[in-house]
Amino acid sequence: MKIAVLAGDGIGPEVVAQAVRVLEALTSDGMKFEMEPALLGGCAVDATGKVFPEATRKLATEADAVLLGAVGGSQYDSLPREQRPEQGLLAIRKDLNLFANLRPVALYSELANASTLKPEVILGLDILIIRELTGDIYFGEPRGIKWHDDQRVGFNTMIYSESEIRRIAHIAFQAAQKRNQKLCSVDKMNVLECTQLWHDVVIEIAKEYPDVELSHMLVDNAAMQLIRNPKQFDVIVTGNMFGDILSDEASMLTGSIGMLPSASLNDKSKGLYEPIHGSAPDIAGKDVANPLATVLSAAMMLRYTFNQEAAAVRIESSVKKVLTEGYRTSDIYQPGMKEVGTREMGDAILMNL
Ligand code: NAD
């Protein structure tokens, strides 16, 4: 099992180190991982002048899976756009054709009081957000900032082809079939033609999945419903930008953005696995970041790319166990619990593995 390890910037290297330790611990079960590091994002710009160097592209293409930390930092914000770390992320997603982003949002009951929402609103929460990842306004052309009538105007293009909508809709219906057979498609069809097409194509695909109950919701309402009554959702499918925003919002239902893993898959189950959070420059280098989202991303890698369900469950059970035992990084800390740093949290997981 060949894994490209792209730790990235900020807290990336700290949290990825813990996931790597967890994967290494599984080798005693006879699993063999070949893990090779490479540069992506700000660290790659610093070392090579490129956000997505050729050596990284080659390794990511050859590997079965990619484990990523996070990229970005304010020191790069004034660079030309093509040299900003986030462009590296967009480039690797596009390069590997990782169009399906799976973001499970499940609450560990031990963290019910760590969320800003009332426990009764979130206890039992288990949602899967499926975000289309290689289309939409993030990639659409034309884009830019230009002069028009003596002032600057900024513009981007929201665009989806029906084949792009179809392939993500199939992934979403099939995921719903394996869960509670409920799929909510989120769009903004009342004002955006692009998402009218999204809406219509999802309805066409629904005919192939009569066992799945399909509903539709406008994105503004979805943002509100996620806070009002999140347990009404089973699987949510949406475009790149709406999914970006809604999944960050949903992360707070679980207590912290430091808890949420993600998988980005192509049509051959090759995947890039990363926590949904960013590089958190405000806490980088302090050994306080929560590594659980990255560790849980490694579990998703075992499940979706390597088909090692038992090993994935083993990691997830260890995470649950450390939470039951009271270990907490500062983002999920509550009085009476054992506050630990990033590495100590890794130690606790290894003990339970
Ligand atoms: P962020 O997710 O990095 O941080 C938001 C807040 O959550 C911060 O207060 C941070 O301390 C906290 N946080 C994030 N992860 C945490 C963890 N594991 N444990 C504890 N607390 C955690 O978002 P931001 O501040 O908007 O962005 C910072 C940088 O990251 C920017 O350069 C941005 O472009 C980049 N970014 C990268 C990715 C990615 O690599 N996938 C995603 C989002 C943002």
Image: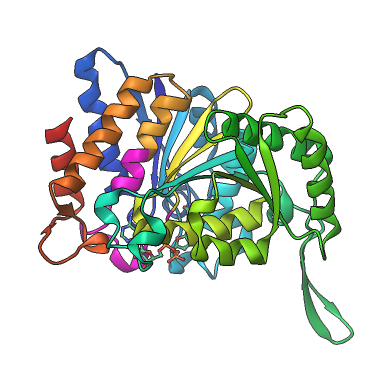
Q: Quadrant of residue 166?
A: top right
**What residue is rendered at 57% in x and 56% in y?**
244
Q: Is the residue 78 above or below the residue 48 in the image?
A: below
Towards the viewer: 117 or 303: 117
Q: Is residue 230 visible?
A: yes
Q: Is residue 133 visible?
A: no
Q: Quadrant of residue 210?
A: top right
Residue 28 pos. (x, y %): 19, 17
Q: Which residues are magenta?
A: 277-296
**What residue is rendered at 24% in x and 32% in y?**
22
How are the colours assigned in the image? rainbow
Q: Is the residue 114 above or below the residue 302 in the image?
A: below
**The residue positioned farthest toward the top in the image shown:** 30
Towards the viewer: 206 or 273: 206
Q: Tell me, yes or no, whether the highlighted magenta stretch contains residue 295.
A: yes
Instruction: Decide if residue 259 is on the left or right side of residue 239.
Output: left
Q: Is the residue 154 above or below the residue 84 in the image?
A: below
Residue 274 pos. (x, y %): 43, 43
Towards the viewer: 28 or 326: 326
Q: Tell me, yes or no, whether the highlighted magenta stretch contains residue 294.
A: yes
Main secondary structure of the magenta stretch: loop
